[in-house]
Image (spheres, rainbow, N blue to C red):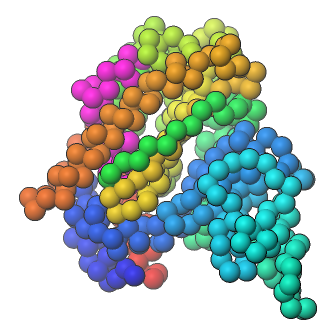
Amino acid sequence: MYDRHRILDLLRRAKPAHTLPQPFYRDADLYEFDVSAVFTRSWLLLGFEAELPEPGSYLSVAIGPHPVILVRGRDEMIRGFHNVCRHRGSQICAQASGRLTRIVCPYHKWTYDLEGRLVGAARMPEGLNFVEHGLLPIRIELLEGCIYGALTPAAPAFAPFREAAAPFLRPYRLASAKLAHQSVLIEKANWKLVMENARECYHCAAWHPELKVSFPVVFGAGFAVTDGSRSAAFVSSMGELGLPVGPVAGPWWHVGRYPLNPGAETVSMNGRAVVPQRLLETNGTCVGGLRWATDPNTFCHAVADYAFMFAAIPTGPEETRVVSKWLVPKEAREGVDFSVDDLTEVWSRTNLQDRELAENNQRGINGFGYRPGPYADSAEELVIRFNDWYRATAAQAAEQG
């Protein structure tokens, strides 16, 4: 069990625009605090509507020690539940996806319908209140094909993010896309180190040779490409297509469009499209990329031909499960229109390179010589935002107990 008074004391010692005190990156009680008090009061990108294409489709995921399940009901509505049987607490569905007609606990076969209602509990005493023993729901919000969930009522209002992000996301029609591939990478590093690395491109020019072929790895303030004239031309061309550029931001989210490098159509090994079909209508214009990110643990990029999701899920004080997903237009055929290798190569290589950086960062922070260091105002602007969000959210959680 974590000591909230110790956490508040550590937070008071944390300097703005600096890395955190060492315990935040390595102590078991701080890990427990993060997964039980920080993640549970946050909106988490759990998946995409495209992963639940028909009634009975389900997706089970774990947020640290907290298993949850997403299900599309017979009424087409997507619901989320704690993936915990109301009998003796067993996890019902393994971490997987698929289709089912009812939700059945493997232990004693308690059975729930797709709306989470208990409908079967053999050999229980008469008088068991089935209504009171349905699956416990989690909060679900759908945003232009994305499924966000919150484990407790303590999560902030979702509406400001929806209102800001929807105009950016809507043209990509992600609800009618399909999942082409997903991968899981285990990183021996605290989740905050994984996300600090993911929130900046200060290191990108030196570490990501494949990414920088098409992706503009040098950004200025506000996620704007530093080449002002090119940015101005890009904003003008997007305006003609009716596509917002931004960036726009809230306390826990950030959305913005960016131009790709000259001559690049998409983020790929050579900058050329990897899927001939398109997620959005471009009228032949290069629409660059769209990035949206939410704290604590995700970022996504959408280009004309595919979308990419990155999620960092803490699994221990010094271990993180990185889940990546690629969406393509529904009509695109694997092996005919695109290959998974071409689709995924840039981001897969980038993930492996980032794993090396995060793990090396963890080794240094574990040492006696670690002292919190300063962030770069411009190059690490989004890391500073993440750090500010974490300190504020952690303080609120610790103060409220």
Q: Residue at x 71, y 20 (%)?
A: 332
* Residue 128 position within the rendered picture, expressed as x and y whole percent measured from the top left: 86, 88
Q: Identify whether 264 is placed above or below 259.
A: above
Residue occupying the point 34% across, 82% down: 3
Q: Is residue 102 visible in the rendered structure shown here?
A: yes
Expressed as whole percent of the image width and height from the top left, the position of residue 9 reads 26, 78
Task: Give the residue drawn at x 49%, y 43%.
Answer: 184
Bounds of the magenta span? 191-214
Label the magenta part by its dominant secondary structure.
helix
Does the rendering let one see residue 140? no
Quarter of the image where the C terminus is located: bottom left
Q: Is residue 112 left or right of residue 233?
A: right
Asked if residue 113 is among those painted magenta in the image, a careful observer would answer: no
Q: Residue 315: x and y, percent?
A: 43, 60
Residue 149 found in image quarter: bottom right
Q: Position of residue 361 (x, y in %)?
A: 23, 48
- Outermost residue, left side: 369
